[in-house]
Every structure is written in C-alpha cells, then in structure tokens.
Image (tube, rainbow, N blue to C red):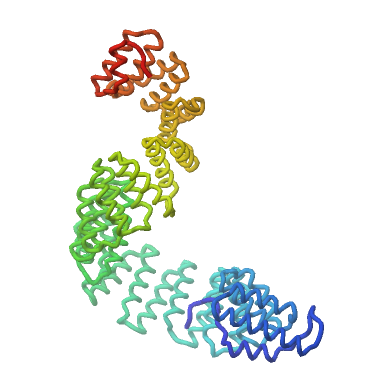
Amino acid sequence: MRVYVTVIGLSLTLAFAACSTSKRTGGSATGDPVLLKQRTDSIFFAAQRSKMIGDYRTALSQYSDYLKYDRTNAVVFYEIARLLMETHSGPYALNFARRAATMDTANHWFQQLLADAYAVSEKFDSGAIVYSRLARKYPENDDYLYNQGVLLSKANKLEAALAVFNKLEEKTGVVEEVTYQKQKLLLRMSKADEAAAEIKRLIATNPAETRYYYLLAEVYDANDQVADATAVYNDILSRDPENARALIALGSYARKRQDMPAYWDYMTRAFANNTYSIDEKVAYVYPYLRMLEIDTSKMQEGLQLAHLIVDAHPNDAKSYALLGDMYSQGDILDSAQVYYQRSLSLDSTRFSVWYQQMWITSRQENPNVLLTLSDTVTRLFPKEFMGFYFNGLANYLLRQYPATIVSMNKALAIGDAEKRFTADVYSLLGDAYHATGNNLLSDSSYEKALLIRPKDATVLNNYSYYLSLRGENLNKAAEMSRRSLEIDPESPTFMDTYAWILFRQEKFQEAKEWMDKAFLFPASLQNASMLEHYGDILYNLKDVNKAVEYWQMAQEKGASSVALTKKIAEKRYVQ
C-alpha cells in the first residue's frame, strides 16, 4: 500500500515513445512537414534535458514553445502538468492534466495525474471519481482503491469512503494503513467502539506490535474512555515494564485525579529510562516554560521533571540546556547560568545556549564579563547578529564607543534579526556616535531607529535631548520630547529633557513648571544634572539666590564641571 501522494514520475522511455508516436500538425506554423517535425523534436528533447537537470522553469518554457507548433501531443500537456505540480503550482496544473487525460484516455499515468491534480486543487470528489475508474480498469492495483477512499474522506463523504476501504480490505485482508484510515473515519462518525474494534483486529494479526496498543489506547483516550485506555497501557506494561510512553500516559491520568504520589512514581520510572529518547522527554517538559508565564506554581514541577532528564542523561548537553531554560524562565538566573555552562562544556556549538548566557549577563550589570563572553561568541559564530549586538552593548557600557560602533555595524551587516533588535542597534549607534562627536551619523541612526519603532520613548528622549544640547532643531526636539511624555508620562527623566528644551527656547516659566513636576519624584532630588538644570532655569527667572542653592546641591550630588564651579563662584549662569 502507499499513502496518497502526488504522482511525480513517468519513465523517460514512456515519454519518448509517446512523443515518437504522436501525430503532429502544423498548428500556427507553416512550411515543410519534415522540418516542422525536426523542430518540434528538437524543442521536446531540449525540454526533457532541462527537466532532467532540475531546471523546471526552462523546461516549462520549452514545452510551452512546443505547443506553438503542435497541440496534439498529450505527453507535452502531461509534462507541463507534472512540472507545475512539482513547482507547487498545482491548481494551474489541472487544465493541462485534463487535456492530457482527455486526449489519451487509455494512458493510466495521465489519468492518475489528473486525479492528483484534482486533489491538490481540493476537488476531492472529482479526484475520487477518476481513481474509481482506474480501480475498475486495473483491479490488481490496490493503490487506486486506497487513494479513492482517501479522497472521499477528504471530501467528507465518510460512509462512501468507509465502503471503499472495506472493499479494499476484502482483497488485502487486515492491513495497517487501511485499518488506520477506517478507525479515523469511524471516530469522525462518532463510532468509537467500532474504531476500537478495528484496532483490535489489527492487534490480532500481530500481538507483539506495541504501536497497535498505543493506537487503541489513543482511540479510547480521544473518547474519554479512561478506564479502557488505562487497561491497555497496563497491558503494555505487563509486556514491557519500563515502557516510557505507557508510564507517562498513566502518570497523566494520575495527575488528573490529583494522585500526585502515583504521578511522580510513573514519571520517575519513565524519565529514568535512558533508552527513552531525550528529545521526547524534552518535548514533554518544554510546555512548562510557557506555563510559567501564567502560573508560577508550575515551577517546581517543571524543575523536578528537568532534573529527572539530567539524571538519566548526564552527558547530553540538551538536558542541561533545558534545566537552564527552566531556571531562566523562573528568573533564577545564577542557577540558569550554571546549567547553561554545563551544557556548553558538553557541546559548544549550540548558539541558543550562548545567547541565553549573554542575555543573562547583560542583566547583571557586569559589562566586562559580557564583553569577554560576547568576544568568544563572535569568534565562534561570526554570522550571528546577536553576538555582535551584545558585544556592542558591552563596549557601550564600558564607554568604549568606537568599539561599540564597529560591533553594531557588523551586526547590521549580518542582518537577519527581528526588527526590535535592529531598532536597538540603531538606538545604541545614535548614542555612541553622539559620544564620539559624530552628530550627523548620530541623528541618522536615531531616525532609522524611529522608522522601525516610532513609539520608542527612550530614542525620542535621547535624540531630542542631544539636539537641545547643540541648540539645533529645537522645535523638532520639543515635539519628540512631548511624544516621549505621551508614551511615558510618569518619567521624571523625560520631564527634565522637555524642561531643558523649553529652557533652550527661552520658555523659562514653562521649563520651571515641568521641573517642578519632575521633582515630585523623590529620586529626582538625587540627580545632579536635574538639580543643575533647575538652577539654570531659576537664574533666568531672576531668582539668583535659589539658583545658587540648586547649583550647590548639584555639586554635593557629584556634579563637578568647570562651568558649574563658575556658576557658584560668580553667581551667574554660564553656558
């Protein structure tokens, strides 16, 4: 038996034979019939060569050229239909397949292609009719009946499909593929007991085949017949006491009835089986990572399962990577790093694990460690965007701005990143270019960041602030600063920026009002830059004594510029 697939093959001998025996007419061409035959033969064989080397586009073009001279050759219509299906243009293939099948009704390859073209065009009824005709004409070919049944099932003609599969089974006896199709149909028809009976018949043909028992249990499980499914899984365990799939299924039932001791007994036995694929174990545990986003109570259970995998597979990097992911998702970052490092010691080729290490390190305010780590990653993975991103971030935090610019531009050259990370790169480039005095590239970088993420309040704030420091485009700076406050109206830093822009526009009273809002947040009174700004505003509002008081407060909080010293000494604003 074969599962339904699109027909893609026809022997070259058949194609050549059909070509040589087809009649040709001049079509739109005129001239010597001998020359016309030579011309069409040449085009046909050129198309065949293109098809054989996999150049389907050229082959399609050449077959189309052939039809300009001769539209009576069914093989050419057939070949065009095949190539269109091969290039995932199935719906376009249908007309060509119809033409070939109509021109040569005796060729079963043409008829089979037509059925398949109907199928990929989702005309399942029509495809089933073609396979029905083929099955009657070629009763020795069981595939035709099988495909007819599949297409009837897809057409939602369940009774008719079941009848076809029963007819096929009368010829073949109990066969796995047919039984599988029948039980699916019976389940769709809400005949769970009959579906189970079909699987039992299959089991009777080969009682040692464990897969059939799984299939029977799944039929029961799908219909909430837990007692019957449990009996099947226990039957499996009587034959194979360490069968992990059966243990996990029974564990799941125990968990649903809140019998946690039984649950952990089953799961411990299942996961301790080191012959059970680690990939299947990881697939079972991985959903806990998402559960943790909405239910932190799942943390302990997920960790316990992940530790069981590590115990069973102590030399497999995937087990430690999973455990690291569990701790990372639970925000237990120190433990996450320990297990990520163990994973990398076993397999240093897993970029996803290196990425997690860099991400955690970036949150720990230790740029020197991040720089060392990202240097290693960029050496091992020179085509990974995020390696250079974190390298640039580390250099920026260390105020190594030229190195930041180099790394961030390498990240951009690699590309292939999510938009949010590309926007972050441009944002950091804007900051780094500003720090190196390259205002033109700084502004350009901020503009690119805002094209990607127009509501990035931090970029809006930084860009507007640096414009105000230069005294350039103050109206644009004010607009961007207002937008940042609309996005984050509770940020005293953004209030300070807006106040400073108003100050540069000589709107001193408005500037003071915004600074008064900022100072409603106690942390602002610890910010030397904000205190100095407030002093500048007060001076320009003619409150000299109060201005000096705030300048002195700024100096006490760590500000130490020459300009500030002169402001205090001379009791006047110095730009």
Compared across the picture, whether 336 is left or right of 130 comes to: left
Q: In which quarter of the image is residue 547?
A: top left
Q: Where is residue 368 in the image (x, y as percent from the top left)?
A: 24, 45
Q: Which of 350 and 234 is in front in this view?
A: 350
Residue 129 appears in the rendering? no
Q: In which quarter of the image is residue 7?
A: bottom right
Quarter of the C terminus within the rendering? top left
Instruction: Tell me if residue 252 comes above or below residue 6 in the rendering.
Output: above
Where residue 317 sits in the image (x, y, percent)?
A: 24, 63
> What residue is rendered at 30% in x and 59% in y?
380
Residue 104 relative to residue 398: left or right = right
> Relative to 112, is 315 on the left or the right?
left
**Residue at (56, 78) in percent of width and height:** 148
- Number of numbered discs visible in the structure rendering: 0
Q: Which x, y percent locates residue 461?
A: 42, 31
Relative to residue 113, is residue 532 depicted above or below?
above
Residue 417 in sight from this viewpoint: yes
Residue 311 found in image quarter: bottom left
Residue 33: x, y in percent?
Answer: 78, 88
Front-lying residue, 106 or 567: 567
